[in-house]
Image (cartoon, rainbow, N blue to C red):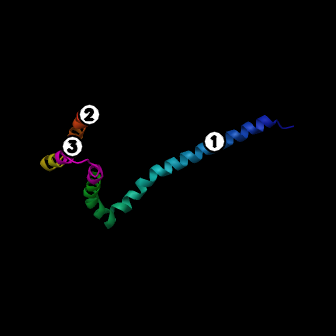
Amino acid sequence: MVNVDFVLTALFTVLALAAILVTAAVTWALRAVPFAARAPLRASATVQYRSTRMPAGVMVILVVSCLHDLPGPHVRVLGPLATPAVTLTLHLWRRNALLSILGGTAVHVAPASTISAR
């Protein structure tokens, strides 16, 4: 006579191993897809066009979405208005993305943690 506990344990072990193998295969495939798709995408004229136009478009969308809710003339408006101006000025002055990101972040955080915190 077959022991039911042994059969259930063996079935659970097989199903657990199958789930682990499927998960590993899907994870490996998802990590490999970008490397397989990179070569055809680099040759694409559409991707090359978008790579030159998208960064400016993304920045415009970010600035508009950050500034569209600002209250009227109020001291709390200074931080959000100064941040894009400082970021743009630093970027045009040095052409260094890290410097402009850090400078803009510092200009945003300083008023936000002092003026707006009150």
Which residue is at a point 25% across and 60% down the rendered structure image?
52
- Of label 2 and label 3, which has the lower sequence position? 3
Assess disc 2: are there few (<14), some (14-19) or many (≥20) residues with their C-alpha within 10 Å of its C-alpha. Answer: few
- Of label 1 and label 3, which has the lower sequence position? 1
Q: Quadrant of residue 75?
A: top left
Q: Which mark is residue 17?
A: 1
Q: Is residue 42 above or below residue 110?
A: below
Residue wearing tag 3: 74
Q: Secondary structure at mark 3?
A: loop
Assess disc 1: are there few (<14), some (14-19) or many (≥20) residues with their C-alpha within 10 Å of its C-alpha. Answer: few
Give, as a three-letter code, the residue at label 3: His
Which residue is at a point 64% across and 41% down the rendered structure image?
16
- Give the quarter of the figure containing the N terminus: top right
Task: Indicate yes or no whether the magenta region holds residue 71.
Answer: yes
Assess disc 3: are there few (<14), some (14-19) or many (≥20) residues with their C-alpha within 10 Å of its C-alpha. Answer: few
Q: Is residue 112 above or below residue 27?
A: above
The answer to the question of whether label 2 and label 1 lie on touching residues, with beta carbons closer than 8 A, is no
Q: Is residue 82 above or below residue 37?
A: above
- Give the quarter of the figure containing the C terminus: top left
Residue 29 position, x and y percent, is 50, 51
Give, as a three-letter code, the residue at label 1: Leu
Q: Which portion, as a residue range, is magenta? A: 63-87
The answer to the question of whether label 2 and label 3 lie on touching residues, with beta carbons closer than 8 A, is no
Q: Secondary structure at mark 1?
A: helix
Q: Quadrant of residue 80?
A: top left
Task: Indicate yes or no whether the magenta region holds residue 38.
Answer: no
Residue wearing tag 2: 113
For discs 2 and 1, the disc positioned in front in the rendered view: 2
